[in-house]
Image (spheres, rainbow, N blue to C red):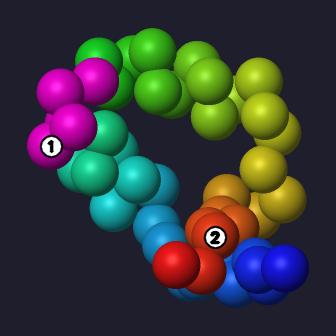
Amino acid sequence: MKKNTVQEVTWEELLLEARNAGLNCDEVRDFLKKEKPTGGKKKEVEAV
């Protein structure tokens, strides 16, 4: 079973990642707002 690790990220990094992935930043912003992240600075990523 893999553990989730919490990685410090900023909104700018998230948006930049999304832009690099070819996603629309407004759509990403809307998605993030819907998710209601706590503090907006952490995201859980699956350890590979």
Q: Looking at this view, is 24 or 21 the one in front?
A: 21
The percent coordinates of residue 5 (x first, y second) are 70, 84
Dividing the picture into quadrants, the one containing residue 18 is: top left
Residue 44 drawn at (x, y percent):
70, 67
Report the disc number at residue 46. 2
> Callout 1: helix, strand or loop?
helix
Q: Is residue 17 left or right of residue 31?
A: left
Q: CA distance from mark 2 to mark 1?
A: 20 Å
- 8 is within the stretch colored magenta: no
Residue 24 rendering spot, x and y as whole percentages: 29, 18
Counting other residues with Cα less than 10 Å from the Cα at mark 2, is it few (<14), some (14-19), or many (20 or more)? few
Occupied quadrant, residue 2? bottom right
Tell whether position 22 is magenta.
Answer: yes
Q: Bounds of the magenta span?
A: 19-23
Residue 27 appears anywhere in the view: yes
Q: What is the three-letter code of the residue carrying label 2?
A: Glu
Residue that carries the numbered disc 1 in the rendered image: 20
**Which secondary structure class fits the magenta region best?**
loop
Q: Is residue 36 above or below residue 2?
A: above
Could you say which is closer to the camera, residue 16 or residue 3?
3
- Coordinates of residue 32 in the picture (x, y in percent): 63, 34
Q: Residue furthest front?
A: 1
- Residue 41 can be seen, yes or no: no
Asked whether, in this view, residue 4 is left or right of residue 47, the answer is right
- Placement of 11 over or under 36, stated as above or below: below
What kind of residue is marked 1? Asn
